[in-house]
């Protein structure tokens, strides 16, 4: 069969569930786009036979010229250049470093791209600069490169959930910007590569948010609704990217950065991170010193990092040889994903490790300066009515001879004495008025402010176990490591309105609790809590091996669903019973296929 005959066959129409005929999506041109064969061969042989196919759109938008010689060399063999310097396909997409790493992996595995690790790193860096995301575009979905467990609340409706978030996080497409033609080609790629995609894209959805078509017209396919949304929400060119292109420059992050790092299960750490330029302005070596405010232990780490697109940090650090404790940061190399502010005075992100990246510090950085800087307070919160309470301020460049009048902790909180002070720590005695304003107070020292740095509360109204929805994975011999889960119990004051789970609630940090697991009954014989694994006194869940388990009814595997329960040791509810909080945990099978780009941190 000739190429023309194959194309004609694959362009035959099929009948949808509604009876309307639609062009078949698995035609030869899509295959050629994926395998990088020259489509001109088919077009020349079948120009008379093949009408213009709407699933093979013509690019009409202005592209982004690719000027880097290495990118042109490595990508230009298959992605042809036009007179304006655009490379086909590449010039009409923008994404993160991880996104470009995904592309390179796919090109190497499917299309025979020959590229060394050093060349791949250079290409990722170049494309992240010319075809990246602005800070404003990346920030709302930064949880994906930071490997955070979140319940996505940014999916607009069930139709789009089915089309875009049934198989992966909704952040995955939102971390890309594409022309209208490229969004259409992404649909084609899914249909060609993933057997279930076409059915998923066509499956009817019960979605009351979608308008009823007028005059008996057929409902749009779910994928058509999704593409319309993505074209409006994530177009190729945006005002944010245009502005960032003008501002983008070498990050120049060298120097001392003050660290506020919260590690679930272990509490708050403070310290410093020294960044030293290495080679170019956007490559750095790092030296990190952290101190636990919970137990006084210290961590020293060293590593390296690099900056993509002028603000996006990817790095690694370690404390030395690897150890065996899964939850101990000193036993593991961490990967660092952070976003620096455009003014280069602060940064936020996550330093994480684990086979499933399940452990990690939630990190905030502040650039050290000549003026005093407060990065944390200890304890986490103060109770209204407390007298003679001890409060520590941790930071940098504190002046000698601090006086109570030099400090401002907000309405109702009075500094009565400065017990001691050094350049990095001030120990205070404070009184908190019974009618002190409930909420997170600013902490001021001289002209420096730690915004919302000191919560003041009346009582602990409820406990929230985090993560509220969690997943752990069973271990499986040597090939599949267990996926752990670390929990925390955070106390909350219901705030000025007295209503829990509203916007003015005040987080008080971790509180003392005892931990347990309870059955989440889904069938009459449910016994998951006995087999899924063990929860330690510090809320580290260690899953069981996968199975089958001869001790379990019908020899079932050890997967299951349970509640993780925190019971307060001292805090009571209105009936005098200990406060409790719960989290839902699924203990699942190992992840047999992994999607990740650790190389962008190298």
Image: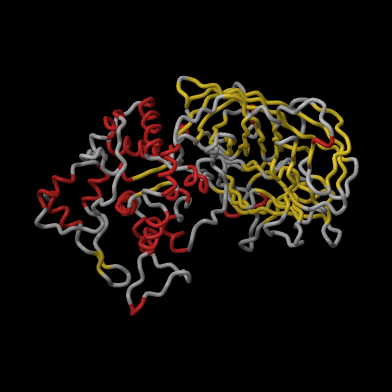
The residue positioned farthest toward the top in the image shown: 279
Residue in the picture at 11% in, 57% down: 49
Residue 165 visible in this rendered orientation of the protein? yes
Q: Nearer the viewer, residue 471 or 376?
A: 376
Residue 229 vertical placement versus 425 (above, below): below
| Residue 363 drawn at (x, y percent) | 62, 37
| Residue 456 drawn at (x, y percent) | 79, 48
| Residue 381 drawn at (x, y percent) | 78, 44
Q: Is residue 314 left or right of residue 359?
A: left
Q: Quadrant of residue 244?
A: top left
Q: Nearer the viewer, residue 502 or 120?
A: 502
Residue 515 visible in this rendered orientation of the protein? no
Q: Is residue 136 left or right of residue 447?
A: left
Q: Is residue 259 left or right of residue 424?
A: left
The residue positioned farthest toward the bottom in the image shown: 215
Residue in the picture at 60% in, 21% down: 320
- Count of picture labels: 0
Residue 17 vertical placement versus 318 (above, below): below
| Residue 573 drawn at (x, y percent) | 82, 58
Residue in the picture at 65% in, 58% down: 520
Q: Quadrant of residue 255?
A: top right
Looking at the picture, the colour scheme in use is secondary structure
């Amino acid at each position: 069969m000739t190429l023309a005959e194959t194309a004609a066959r694959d362009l035959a129409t099929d009948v949808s569930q509604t009876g309307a005929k639609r062009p078949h999506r698995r035609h030869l041109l899509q295959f050629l786009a994926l395998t990088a064969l020259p489509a001109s061969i088919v077009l020349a042989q079948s120009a008379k036979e093949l009408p213009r196919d709407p699933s093979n759109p013509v690019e009409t938008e202005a592209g982004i010229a690719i000027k880097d010689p290495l990118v042109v060399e490595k990508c230009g063999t298959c992605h042809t250049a036009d007179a304006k310097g655009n490379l086909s396909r590449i010039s009409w997409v923008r994404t993160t470093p991880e996104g470009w790493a995904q592309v390179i992996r796919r090109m190497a595995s499917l299309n025979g791209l020959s590229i060394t690790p050093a060349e791949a790193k250079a290409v990722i860096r170049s494309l992240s600069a010319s075809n990246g995301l602005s800070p404003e575009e990346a920030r709302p979905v930064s949880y994906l490169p930071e490997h955070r467990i979140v319940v996505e609340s940014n999916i607009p409706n069930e139709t789009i959930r089915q089309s875009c978030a049934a198989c992966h996080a909704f952040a995955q497409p939102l971390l890309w910007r594409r022309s209208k033609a490229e969004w259409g080609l992404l649909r084609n790629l899914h249909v060609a590569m993933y057997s279930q995609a076409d059915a998923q894209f066509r499956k009817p959805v019960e979605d009351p948010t979608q308008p009823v078509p007028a005059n008996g017209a057929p409902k749009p396919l779910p994928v058509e609704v999704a593409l319309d949304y993505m074209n409006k929400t994530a177009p190729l060119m945006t005002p944010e990217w245009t502005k960032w292109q003008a501002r983008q420059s070498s990050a120049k992050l060298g120097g001392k950065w003050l660290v506020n790092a919260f590690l679930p299960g272990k509490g708050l750490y403070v310290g410093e991170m020294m960044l030293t330029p290495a080679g170019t302005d956007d490559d750095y070596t790092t030296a990190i010193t952290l101190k636990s405010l919970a137990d006084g232990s210290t961590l020293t780490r060293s590593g390296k990092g690099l900056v993509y697109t002028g603000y996006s940090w990817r790095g690694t650090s370690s404390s030395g040889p690897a150890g065996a404790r899964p939850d101990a940061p000193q036993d593991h190399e961490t990967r660092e994903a952070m976003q620096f502010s455009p003014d280069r005075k602060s940064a936020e992100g996550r330093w994480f490790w684990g086979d499933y990246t399940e452990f990690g510090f939630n990190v905030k950085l502040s650039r050290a300066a000549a003026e005093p800087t407060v990065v944390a307070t200890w304890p986490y919160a103060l109770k209204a009515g407390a007298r003679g309470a001890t409060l520590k301020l941790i930071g940098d460049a504190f002046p000698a001879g601090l006086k109570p009048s030099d400090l401002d902790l907000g309405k109702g909180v009075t500094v009565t004495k400065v017990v001691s002070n050094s350049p990095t720590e001030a120990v205070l005695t404070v009184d908190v008025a019974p009618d002190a304003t409930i909420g997170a107070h600013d902490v001021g020292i001289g002209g420096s402010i730690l915004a919302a740095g000191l919560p003041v509360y009346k009582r602990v109204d409820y406990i929230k176990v985090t993560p509220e929805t969690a997943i752990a994975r069973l271990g499986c011999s040597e090939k599949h490591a267990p996926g752990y889960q670390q929990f925390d119990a955070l106390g909350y004051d219901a705030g000025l309105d007295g209503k829990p789970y509203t916007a003015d609630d005040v987080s008080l940090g971790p509180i003392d609790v005892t931990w347990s697991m309870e059955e989440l009954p889904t069938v009459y014989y449910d016994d998951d809590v006995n087999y899924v694994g063990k929860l330690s006194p510090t809320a580290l869940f260690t899953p069981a091996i996968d199975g089958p388990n001869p001790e379990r009814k019908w020899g079932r595997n050890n997967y299951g669903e349970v509640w993780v329960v925190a019971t307060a040791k001292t805090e009571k509810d209105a009936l005098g019973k200990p406060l409790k909080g719960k989290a839902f945990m699924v203990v699942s099978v190992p992840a047999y296929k992994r999607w990740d780009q650790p190389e962008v941190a190298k």
